[in-house]
Image (spheres, helix red, strand yellow):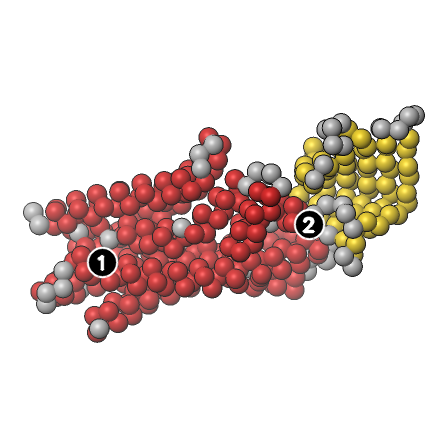
Amino acid sequence: MIIYMYLFKRFSLGLIVSLIVLVSLEIFFSFTAEIKYLNIGNYNIYTLSKYIVLNIPKSISIMFPYAVLIGSMLSLGAMASDMEFVSMQAAGISTTKIMTIIIVQAFILSTLFYYISDSIVPTFSNEAEKNKNQALNKKVIFHKNGVWFKNNNTYIKINEIYSDKNLRDITMYKYDEKSTLSSIKTIVEARYIDKVWKLTKTEETILTSIPITKKYFAEEETIEFIDRKLINIKTHKATSLSLSDVVKNISYLDQNNLDATTQKKIYWDKIFKPFSTIIMLFLSMPFIFGRQRSSNLSQRIVLGVFIGIAFFIISSILPNLGMVLGIAPIISVLLPNLLFIIAGKYLLDYQLQASLR
């Protein structure tokens, strides 16, 4: 029991130190990136500071796996340099058991961390983006050719999205049961107020009437316009969605016969996050328990950073590439993890064998 607590204490210390340093760097770079918006609209120093503070949970979540990797190399590497692992092995504790203890403890810690952060990060991240967009009067999405939505038998093109409650420059194409275009409706602005959509300056062309007729309204109210869930699915980033939100989005898209591939990719990304973190930790093991333990600390940190960058690049590219190639999201997300497990096992075996030569 003592050895379990000692290893956990050393690992946690390295993790906390690394996390503080990495998050501090992330906050600094975020602050410098936001300075360019200062004094634009209502975006003052108070709004900027509030944005940075609200995004701290997201920064912690992003940096956590890299902190696990670098923290393990700091603390466990120091233990290896002091020959503490050699002493443990002399006491009958094998290298495999030491690694297993560390990995299991890290997995439990990672699972708890991501479970808690999944409910905290989206709330604060959404609030931060909302405050920033309101201060800058910034569009969440703006495309020259518009963003397209399908709501029942209506196809909707929206050129400007400020939030899920404020839309501008909208065109609606409504089809009948025979898939024939029945009407075209343009709307200058739509606002969701008190559970009702309030439409401003609408013009509707009815194609099924003879002759074709047009209707004009300065203001119009309707309950049935566009489901706000569709807008949220389109505008919210993965970090702004909790696992429960993603499950609801997938269910909604499937029920409406819409493509849920992106949401499924986000879902599997979240499910495999603790495993991905442990894989990053596993990748550091060859440089701690092999012959590299005799090298200096700076070399281990550099190696750890390169491993983290390689893992980040591959785990980011392959799932997106898989979506383009039509590969199932679970396979495209799982594949880079499997590749790094194999690479880590090979490196570990090689280093352990080399240390015996």
Q: Residue at x 32, y 46 (%)?
A: 307
Of the 4 image quadrants, the one containing the N terminus is bottom left
Q: Marks 2 and 1: in contact by CB < 8 Å?
A: no
Residue that carries the numbered disc 2 in the rendered image? 228
Structural crowding at the residue carrying mark 2, measured as other residues with C-alpha within 10 Å and reported as few (<14), some (14–19) or many (≥20): few
Q: Residue at x 35, y 45 (%)?
A: 337
Q: Quadrant of residue 183?
A: top right
Between residue 293 and residue 28, name the one nearer to us: 293
The mark found on residue 305 in the picture is: none
- Residue 273 seen in render: yes
Query: SS for tag 1?
Result: helix
Q: Residue at x 16, y 65 (%)?
A: 84
Q: Earlier in the sequence, mark 1 or mark 2?
A: 1
Q: Amino acid at mark 2?
A: Arg
Residue extending furthest left?
357
Q: Is residue 175 left or right of residue 232?
A: right
Residue that carries the numbered disc 1 in the rendered image? 99
Q: Residue at x 87, y 43 (%)?
A: 201
- Location of residue 98 in the rendering, given as x and y in whole percent from the top left corner: 20, 61
Q: Quadrant of residue 18?
A: bottom left
Between residue 284 and residue 274, name the one nearer to us: 274
- Location of residue 195 in the rendering, given as x and y in whole percent from the top left corner: 76, 57
Q: Is residue 52 left or right of residue 339?
A: right
Residue extending furthest top?
211
- Location of residue 236 in the rendering, given as x and y in whole percent from the top left corner: 60, 49
Q: Amino acid at mark 1?
A: Met
- Location of residue 157 in the rendering, given as x and y in whole percent from the top left corner: 72, 37
Between residue 59 and residue 187, name the one nearer to us: 187
Q: Is residue 253 left or right of residue 5?
A: right
